[in-house]
Amino acid sequence: MTGEVEPPRVDSPQILVVEDDAELRAMLERLLQDSGYAVDVAGDGQAGLHLALTRSYDVLLVDRGLPAIDGLDLLRRLRRRGIATPALFLTAYGELSDRVAGLDAGAEDYVVKPFEVDELLARLRALRRRHLATATVLTLGSGELDVASRAVRLADGTEVVLSAREMALLHALAVRPNRVFSRDELRELVFEAAESASIVDTYVHYLRRKLGSGVVRTVWGLGYRAGTL
Ligand code: CA
């Protein structure tokens, strides 16, 4: 008998953890997996750099003090190569200059060790949300999203202006065009905590009305992914 075809599934948010302390690394891996992340780990800066350059992640968690290539240098190298994945630094207690240097190097936020697990998870969520709010221009199929001005430029030169929430939703999908997002994850990334996941469906409907039915693809029973303009 042939094996069953594996059904398509929602992709978990992907995180890279770069931490040289083996015990902490294993703890973070378990914790993040339990929280719904797909986790890659690296034990030094060189391995972390290699993974970050060759795979695509939703968020990076990088220890400041690392062998081979330290955390600061790792972030700088990634930013120089145009990799803008949001990054959270882990830094030792009380080292203010470390934190400032980390932010200068391209980390968006830091957590001081020892940290509370809930705080770390909340910071990761906040970081991903904030990252989506930063000004940028993205391509989607033959069109372009200008996130700051909320304008979508189509291949024929037409411009369609979206509401802030419409743009936030389309941006969230377009940043990772090959990923299937659950409605819950999109609600968490784009809308307020108090809203139900059906608000995602409502805004997908708005986007399709403005930009055509192909702009967002429904993955039945799972959620949504970016389509094309
Ligand atoms: Ca370390």
Image (cartoon, rainbow, N blue to C red):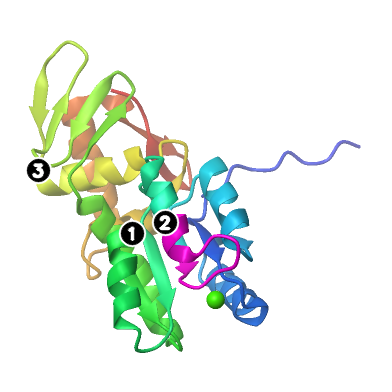
Q: Which quadrant holds the N terminus?
A: top right
Q: Closer to the observer: label 1 or label 3? A: 1
182 to 224, vertically: above or below = below
Compared across the picture, whether 197 is left or right of 147 comes to right
Q: Nearer the viewer, residue 89 or 195?
A: 89
Asked whether mark 2 lies closer than 8 Å to ligand 1, one says no
Q: Position of residue 127 (x, y in %)?
A: 31, 64
Which sits earlier in the primary sequence, circle 3 or circle 2? 2
Q: Which residues are magenta?
A: 62-75
Residue closer to the observer: 111 or 219: 111
Q: Is residue 171 visible?
A: yes
The residue labelled by disc 2 is 75
Q: Amino acid at mark 2?
A: Leu
Name the residue: 64% across, 66% down.
43
Question: Badge 2: few (under 14), some or many (20 or more) residues near its Cα, within 10 Å?
Answer: many
Please say if the residues under marks 3 and 2 sit with CB atoms less than 8 Å apart: no
Secondary element at image label 2: helix
Q: Is residue 89 above or below residue 6?
A: below
Point 35% across, 41% down: residue:
175
Upstream in the sequence, badge 1 or badge 3? 1
Q: Are marks 1 and 2 in contact (CB under 8 Å)?
A: yes
Relative vertical location of residue 145 with respect to residue 51 in this rendering, above or below: above
> Which residue matches tag 1?
105
Give the residue drawn at x 33%, y 54%: 186
In which quadrant will I find the C terminus?
top left
Q: Is residue 112 left or right of residue 151?
A: right
Q: Quadrant of ligand 1?
A: bottom right
